[in-house]
Image (cartoon, rainbow, N blue to C red):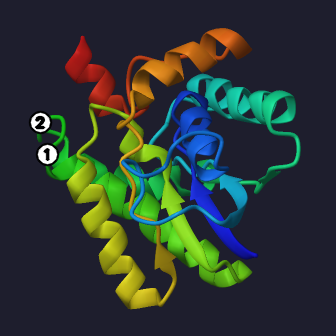
Amino acid sequence: MKKLLLHTCCAPCMLPALEVLLGNTSWERVLEEPPEYEITVWPYNPNITDDEEYQRRKNAIVNVLKEAYPTISLLEDHSEQDRNHWFQYASLLKDEPERGKRCTFCYGYRLYRTFRKAQELGFDAVATTLTLSPLKNTPVINQIGRILEKRTKIHYLVSDFKKNNGMKRSKELCEKYSVYRQNFCGCVFSLRSRA
């Protein structure tokens, strides 16, 4: 079976994505192809610069995987090591609106690192849970994934996890497993724009 590295932004987005990727729910409107992969989750998120928020989200992923999907592998992320690098570049775009150039940079940064990790560890494919959020620009995320697929020769699994009521399902699963649901992407700029 081919191996998929699933970039995971948070537990609320991961849960419905895993249902689709594991074939536990309909994939036809969500993915361009049937999901037939051995999945490893990678919660790589250097955009979360607040230590407490970062740990809270990471713990939510670890705990819900143990409870709901104990056979799914979790790859240690070390996102905190890249925070300064991410922030250095993102701060150049600090005045950009949400869903603008800063967010595009952030999607690209995290997906680029995910593809590099996939190359390093011999994965066949990459996917991301970023496409579940209605606050994220799914066409841009998938475009970045396709570009990186061409550059790396690692397959990008095009997705739109918000389809088939993905957000509704996320809320249901978070209630079921008592998962922390945040109300911002994690970056300081997003938090500032919500104030």
- Amino acid, disc 2: Pro
Residue 52 at what x, y percent from top left? 62, 23
Disc tally is 2
Q: Nearer the viewer, residue 20 or 140?
A: 20
Give me the disc on residue 132: none
Residue shown at 66%/17% (left/top)? 179
187 vs 42, left or right, is left
Above or below, comparing residue 82 to residue 10 in the picture = below
Residue shown at 51%/68% (left/top)? 113
Residue 87 at what x, y percent from top left? 38, 49
Q: Which of 162 and 27 is in front in this view?
A: 27
Give me the disc on residue 100: 1
Question: How packed is label 1: few (under 14 Cα within 10 Å), some, or many (20 or more)?
Answer: few
193 vs 151, left or right, is left
Give me the disc on residue 97: 2
Cα–Cα gap, marks 1 and 2: 5 Å
